[in-house]
Amino acid sequence: MTDVNFNTALIVGAGAGLSASLARVLAKDGIKVALAARTIGDLDALAKQTGARAFACDATERPQVEKLFAEVDASLGAPDIVIYNASFRTRGPFVELDPLDVEKALAVTAYGAFLVAQQAARRMLPKKHGAILLTGASAGVKGYPQSAPFAMGKFALRGLAQSMARELSPQGIHVAHVVVDGGIRSARRPDSAESPDSTLDPDAIADTYIHLIHQPRSAWAWEIELRPWVEKF
Amino acid sequence: MTDVNFNTALIVGAGAGLSASLARVLAKDGIKVALAARTIGDLDALAKQTGARAFACDATERPQVEKLFAEVDASLGAPDIVIYNASFRTRGPFVELDPLDVEKALAVTAYGAFLVAQQAARRMLPKKHGAILLTGASAGVKGYPQSAPFAMGKFALRGLAQSMARELSPQGIHVAHVVVDGGIRSARRPDSAESPDSTLDPDAIADTYIHLIHQPRSAWAWEIELRPWVEKF
Amino acid sequence: MTDVNFNTALIVGAGAGLSASLARVLAKDGIKVALAARTIGDLDALAKQTGARAFACDATERPQVEKLFAEVDASLGAPDIVIYNASFRTRGPFVELDPLDVEKALAVTAYGAFLVAQQAARRMLPKKHGAILLTGASAGVKGYPQSAPFAMGKFALRGLAQSMARELSPQGIHVAHVVVDGGIRSARRPDSAESPDSTLDPDAIADTYIHLIHQPRSAWAWEIELRPWVEKF
Amino acid sequence: MTDVNFNTALIVGAGAGLSASLARVLAKDGIKVALAARTIGDLDALAKQTGARAFACDATERPQVEKLFAEVDASLGAPDIVIYNASFRTRGPFVELDPLDVEKALAVTAYGAFLVAQQAARRMLPKKHGAILLTGASAGVKGYPQSAPFAMGKFALRGLAQSMARELSPQGIHVAHVVVDGGIRSARRPDSAESPDSTLDPDAIADTYIHLIHQPRSAWAWEIELRPWVEKF
C-alpha cells in the first residue's frame, strides 16, 4: 500500500456547509487550505478558524481561474488536493425556463469544473500525484422533471469526471465524483427533530472525501453516492 | 392503441448521413420536412430529392432558433416531429484541451438541443402531441479518456432528455434519446469489406427513429442504444 | 442493410397478454409459432386463433427444455426467434420472505431463461442467424423494497442478456432485453377510463419486439425500456 | 453525527485475501470476529492470528446458515456486522456452459447471500442497528462475454443489495455493495513489479469496508466501486 502525503488543498465554490467541514478537517490534518469563491467576504470567519487563505475567483472565467492557481502556487504551494463544489440550479416548467439560466447552470456546474480541473491536473501530472474531487448530485445520474438546467450541468460534470478518471488515474491522479443525494444540513436547513439525520451532516460528507483522498491507488473509487438513511432513491 | 398522425418534421443539424435518411423516409410517409443547418448550401440536393425546405440556423443562438421555428410554422406548419442531430467534438490529452472547445461542445451538443427542444415543446404542449428525438452517442453514457468535451456535451444532452421525458411524457410529448454507438456509414467512411455492417447504416438508424415516433403512448421508450453487431461494448 | 427472413418462433412462458399479441403478429407475418407453458390447457384458444402449436414445458427443468426444442425442431423447424417471458415474483418484508420463493424466482425468471437461450443459441450459431428476446422488468434495473426475490431474478436475467449480447451479437445472433415498466393491460387489469393508456397495451409491446427482430445488424439494440406515457420513473 | 459501536462481525465465504484483511482490522478495532467457510481447515492460522472463531457452513443450505447464526449468537453475540464474500464463477462459450455451473453460480453468489442477509437482518432490525456488506464484482454491473453464469450471480447479488438498501436503510440497517473491479493480490496472484498496484491490495479494500461500516447514517453509501489505478474500465 502506498503512503502518500498531501500538502495543499484548494476548495472552489467554498461557502458554509460542506466546504467549511472540508476546510476544518483538512487543516486539522496539517494540510494548507485555500478557499475560493466568487465573493470572499463570507469566508473570513472560516479562514480565521482554519488558517485557510481565501481567494476571490469566478470559476467560469478562464483568466480568473489561471490567476487563482498562480496565487495558490505562490502562497501555499501547488495544490495536490482540488475540490470543486460550485453549482447553479434553477427550476420550473420546461417551456418557461430562461435559456440564460441553462447557460449559467452549464457554466458554473460543469465548465468551471473543467477549468479548475485542468489547472489542477497540469500541476499534478508531473508529480504523478494528486486528488481531484468533484461534488455531484443525484441530478447527475437522474434527470428530474422541471429541472433540466441542473440535470444538464450535473450530467456534464459526471461525464467530465468519468472521462478524467479513465484518462488520469493511470497517470497517478485520483479523480472522484461524489453524488450527494439529499439536502445538506445548515443553519438555513436544520435537521428535523421528527426525522433525525434526514439531512446530510456536512462533517459526515467530509469524512468520505477524506477517505477517498487517502485511498491507496490499488483500490480507488471513482464515484460514490451518499444519502441520508431515510432518503428515498 | 392510439393512431396518431404527424404532419411536419424539423431536423436540426442536418447534413448527409442520418439526417438525409430521416428526411427521405419521413417525406416518403407524406410528412413535410424542414432541414436546418448552419450552412445550407450542402442541403440543396437533399432538399430537391425529398421536397424538404432548408433553413439556415445556428442552433446555439437563441434568436436564430426562434426565427427558425417561426419560419417553419409559417411555411410548413408547426412541427410535431423535431429531431436534434447537431454536435461538436474534439479530442486530446486533458491538460492540452482548449477551453474554447469545451464551451463549443457544450453549446452545440447540449445547449442548442435545449433551445430547439424548448421551442418544439411550446408548440406541442397545447396539442398534447408530438415527438422530440435527440441523437446521443456512447460518449453520453460512458466518458472516454482524451474526450472530456464530447463527454460533457453528450452527458448533458442525456440529462436534458431524461428530465424532459419525465416532465413532458405525461403531457403527451414523446421524448427519446437515441444512443448511436459506432461510426455512421458515409461516403467518407464506407463500410468495410472484411467486416460488413461494422458501421451503422443511416437508413437502419432512421428505421428505429421512425419506430419510436410511431410507438403508441402506452408503451413509449425514452432511450435506445444502437450499435453494429460486431461493435465492442 | 441485410434483409433477413425468419421462419419459426418459440415463445416460452406463453399465456394471455404479451405472448398472445406476439403470437398473433408473428403468425400474421407468416412465421410458424410454437407456444410453451407449464400447463397448456389455457393456450387452446390462442393456438386455434393463430395456428400456433402448444407445448407443455417446465422451463426450469433441463430435460424438459431439451425435449421442447427437439419437438419444435421436428414439427416446425428449428426456431430462429426465441422469446422468454416466464417469471415468478413474490413480495413482502425482507425478513419474512420464504427462501423457497427466492429459489423459485431465480429459477423461473433467470435459470429457465438460460436453459432456453442456450438451446436457442445452439440452433442459431451454425447459421449465424437468429433473435433471442428476453422480457425484463423495471425490477431488473432498480431493486425495489419488499421485492428482493423479483429483483434478484430480473437482475440476473439482465446480466444474462448483457453477457449473451456481448458474446453472441458478433456471431450473428441478436439478443435483446426488453424492460417492461408498468402493468400490462389484460382482462384482469383493464385500462383506466380516467387515465387512458396508463397500462401497457400488449399489442404495443409486441410492435417493439417485432421492430427489434427486424433491425438490420448494422444497428442493433440490446435493450429497450417501455413504459406508459404517464408512468413515473 | 451518530457514534455507533459495533460488537461482533461475521464474515461468510472467508478465506485468505480480503476476508483475512477484514478479520485482522476488525479484530484490531476490538470487534469479535466469526469466520464462516465451507471448509475451515484453512482458517486455523487466521483464527489464531486474530482471535477469530471459525465455523463450517455451506451458505447455500438454509439449515446450515440458521445453525451458523445460532452458534455465533451463542458464542460471540448476535453479529451487527455481516459480510458476504462467497461466489462461484466459471467461464466458457455460452453454448458449452454446463447448466449445473449456472445453478451453482446463482446459489453460491446470490442465494447464499440472501440466506445470510436475512438471518443478519432479523438480528439487526429489533435494534435498528447493523451493517451488511456484500462483495460484488464488475461482473455485477457489466455482463462479460463467455461469463454468463458469473454475470447472472453477481447481477442478482446487486439486485438483492439494492432492494435491501431501499427497504432496510430507513430501518437503521446499512446495506452496502462493494464492486471489486480487478484481481485481488494474493500469494497465488502477486502484484506485478512492472506495473505496481495493478492488483487490489486486500488491506486497501478492507479500509473501504471499514469506512463504510463507520459512515454516519446521515451520509450512507449503498455502493462503491474499487479498482486499481491502472485498471481499464
Image (tube, coloured by chain):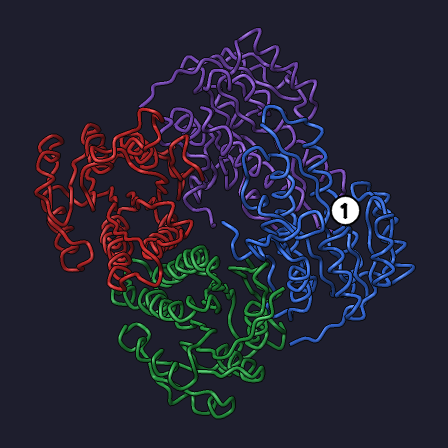
Chain colours: A red, B green, C blue, D purple
The residue lying toward the viewer, choosing from A38 and D182, is: A38
Q: Residue at x 79, y 57 (%)?
A: C10
Q: What amino acid type should be assigned to the residue bearing mark 1?
A: Leu
Instruction: List the residue tagged with mark 1.
Output: C115
The residue shown at (70%, 23%) is D61
Q: Chain of mark 1?
A: C
Please provide percent x and percent y for residue A157. Answer: 33, 53
Q: Is residue B110 above or below residue A146?
A: below
Residue sitting at the far top: D74
Judged from the image, the secondary structure of the residue bearing numbered disc 1 is helix
Give the vertical position of C103 relative to A122 (above or below). above
The residue nearer to you, when weighing A152 against D73, is A152
Report x, y in % for residue C77: 87, 63
Q: Is residue A112 left or right of residue D143?
A: left
Q: Does B138 appear above or below C3?
A: above
Decide if residue D205 is on the left or right side of residue C174.
left
Q: Quadrant of residue B194?
A: bottom right
Q: Closest to the observer: C164 or C20?
A: C20
Toward which corner of the image does residue B120 lie, by quadrant?
bottom left
